Image: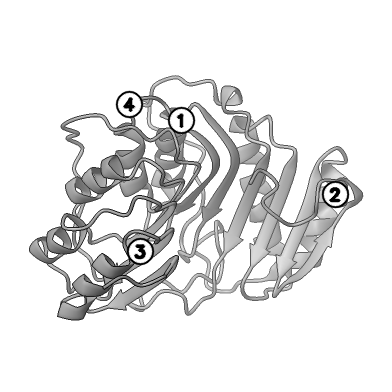
């Protein structure tokens, strides 16, 4: 039996027999698939049964959770060369770690948008037979110590050919960005990536489910008494640090899913300090943008 579905989302306990029938029935027309387990309840055998028994010839977008075995994910991508969007969601209960061993290279030339934790993203990008050219790369940098943020970011970028828009999401209360990088990191000219849009996303304090991350100051310091001016100072210092690597950025974006009173201050300070930079800030769908940002479309992904 076939279903005329082009978009399908399955989340929760994947150990449910009708899911296999549903995937098979929708396989021929499906263009967007979300297949995510909760609390890492799915085993390798279950993932293999779901992914290896069906092919989706029209699939363009695939979202999954980080407890999926990397070998199965790479095999799935190799069998679905039209996938242009890949998202790997963070599961705080997952203990699975990706392996650095890549058995064979796969064709990822259609891949244009990818998001997820850097350890997984790096493995996927390294598996490409040719360095990927991306419209957008989004890295979820939660749970990383502050000294690891920049090195992990640069590792992911160093295996890309081009990245038009780059996003960092940092919901860790003690994640100050350290500009001291690993000396073993290969020298790389990041201007060749031609990054045009750089977005800093600040997540809600309640975003993390395990209670270890409260995120009231993103990329700031581990002080207990947070104040707007202190956070603003570190946000600006953080942008200064990123700017040293991403000299081609034309549009700086800040997205808050909660308010610390940063929006206006960050916007005004950035516009004053960088008059040739397009700046836009979004909070609860309300956008502030200078004239340069308005001319390029405001707060949006202009590369897609």
* Disc 1 from disc 2: Cα separation: 30 Å
Q: Residues within 10 Å of mark 3 (few under 14, many from 20)?
A: some
The mark closer to the camera, 4 or 2, is: 4
* Disc 1 from disc 4: Cα separation: 11 Å
Which residue: 35% across, 72% down? 3
- Circle 3 residue: 90
Q: Measuring from the top left, give residue 150's x and y in whole percent.
A: 47, 41
Query: Does dot 4 land on a helix, a strand or a loop?
Result: loop
- Circle 4 residue: 129
Q: Measuring from the top left, give residue 8's x and y in whole percent.
A: 39, 70
Q: Measuring from the top left, give residue 68's x and y in whole percent.
A: 22, 58
The answer to which of 240 and 166 lies nearer the viewer is 166
Q: Earlier in the sequence, mark 1 or mark 4?
A: 4
C-beta proximity under 8 Å, tags 3 and 2: no
The mark closer to the camera, 1 or 4, is: 4
* Quadrant position of residue 226: bottom right
Which residue: 25% across, 50% down? 73
Dot label at residue 160: 1
* Disc 4 from disc 2: Cα separation: 41 Å
C-beta proximity under 8 Å, tags 4 and 3: no
Q: Earlier in the sequence, mark 3 or mark 1?
A: 3
The answer to which of 166 and 69 lies nearer the viewer is 69
- Circle 2 residue: 271
* Disc 3 from disc 2: Cα separation: 34 Å
C-beta proximity under 8 Å, tags 3 and 1: no
Q: Is residue 43 depicted above or below 258 in this figure?
A: above
């Amino acid at each position: 039996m076939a279903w005329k579905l082009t978009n399908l989302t399955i989340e929760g306990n994947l150990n449910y027999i009708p899911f296999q029938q549903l995937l098979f029935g929708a396989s021929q027309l499906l263009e967007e698939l979300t297949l995510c387990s909760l609390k890492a309840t799915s085993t390798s055998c279950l993932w293999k049964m779901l992914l290896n028994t069906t092919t989706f010839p029209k699939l363009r977008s695939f979202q999954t959770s980080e407890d999926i075995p990397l070998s199965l994910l790479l095999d799935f991508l190799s069998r679905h060369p039209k996938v242009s969007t890949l998202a790997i969601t963070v599961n705080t209960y997952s203990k699975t770690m990706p392996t650095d061993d890549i058995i064979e290279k796969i064709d990822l030339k259609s891949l244009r948008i990818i998001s997820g934790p850097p350890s997984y993203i790096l493995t996927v990008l390294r598996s490409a037979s040719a360095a990927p050219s991306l419209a957008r790369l989004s890295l979820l940098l939660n749970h990383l110590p502050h000294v690891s943020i920049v090195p992990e970011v640069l590792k992911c970028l160093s295996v890309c050919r081009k990245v038009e828009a780059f996003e960092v999401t940092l919901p860790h209360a003690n994640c100050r960005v350290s500009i001291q990088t690993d000396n073993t990191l290969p020298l790389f000219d990041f201007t060749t990536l031609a990054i045009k849009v750089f977005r800093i996303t600040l997540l809600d304090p309640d975003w993390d489910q395990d209670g270890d991350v409260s995120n009231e100051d993103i990329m700031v310091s581990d002080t207990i008494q947070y104040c707007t001016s202190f956070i603003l100072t570190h946000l600006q210092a953080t942008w200064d640090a990123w700017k040293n690597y991403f000299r081609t950025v034309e549009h700086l974006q800040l997205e808050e899913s909660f308010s610390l009173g940063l929006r206006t201050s960050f916007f005004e300070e950035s516009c004053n300090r960088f008059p040739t930079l397009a700046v836009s800030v979004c909070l609860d769908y309300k956008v502030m943008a200078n004239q340069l940002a308005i001319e390029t479309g405001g707060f949006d992904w202009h590369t897609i």
